[in-house]
Amino acid sequence: MQAIPDHMPEHVSVENQFPADLFESMVGFIEQHPQWDQYRLMQSALAGFLFQQGCQDKPVVRHYLDGLFRKPEVAPR
């Protein structure tokens, strides 16, 4: 018998197709803002959309605020 986990996995993989112009804009943004990557950008965008649509789930709000106020990571010297 297979055990049922007590909680959902922390990360799931999602595959999506974007219009080419939207993808190019995302790549341009990431090139200009090295503290961002495609994963952080998509997490922030999804959390922002859900929050703006009225979702008040604590994890969504946390990801939304983290996307707004996350301090840039400083590279070690």
Image (tube, rainbow, N blue to C red):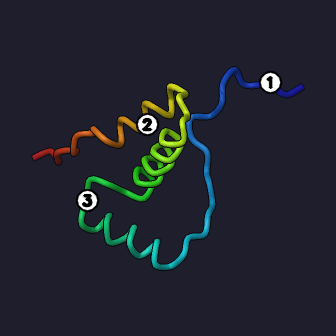
Q: Is residue 68 above or below residue 62?
A: below
Characterize the local packing of mark 2: few (<14), some (14-19) or many (20 or more) Cα atoms within 10 angstroms: many
Marks 3/2: CA–CA distance: 19 Å
Marks 1/2: CA–CA distance: 29 Å
Characterize the local packing of mark 1: few (<14), some (14-19) or many (20 or more) Cα atoms within 10 angstroms: few
Characterize the local packing of mark 3: few (<14), some (14-19) or many (20 or more) Cα atoms within 10 angstroms: few
Depth check, mark 1 against mark 2: the one in front is 2
Marks 3/1: CA–CA distance: 41 Å
Assess whether mark 2 and mark 3 are in contact (beta carbons under 8 angstroms): no
Depth check, mark 3 against mark 1: the one in front is 3
Q: Secondary structure at mark 3?
A: loop
Q: Mark 2 is on which residue type?
A: His
Residue located beneath label 1 in the image = 3
Q: Nearer the viewer, residue 74 or 60?
A: 60
For the view shown, which residue lies furthest in the top direction? 6
From the image, which quarter does the N terminus lie in? top right
Q: Earlier in the sequence, mark 1 or mark 2?
A: 1
Where's residue 42, x and y in %? 47, 54
For the view shown, which residue lies furthest in the right direction? 1
For the view shown, which residue lies furthest in the bottom direction? 20
Residue located beneath label 3 in the image = 34
Q: Residue 45 vs residue 3: left or right?
A: left
Where's residue 65, x and y in %? 36, 35
Where's residue 29, x and y in %? 31, 66
Q: Secondary structure at mark 2?
A: helix
Q: Nearer the viewer, residue 77 or 50?
A: 50
Q: Earlier in the sequence, mark 3 or mark 1?
A: 1
Residue located beneath label 2 in the image = 63
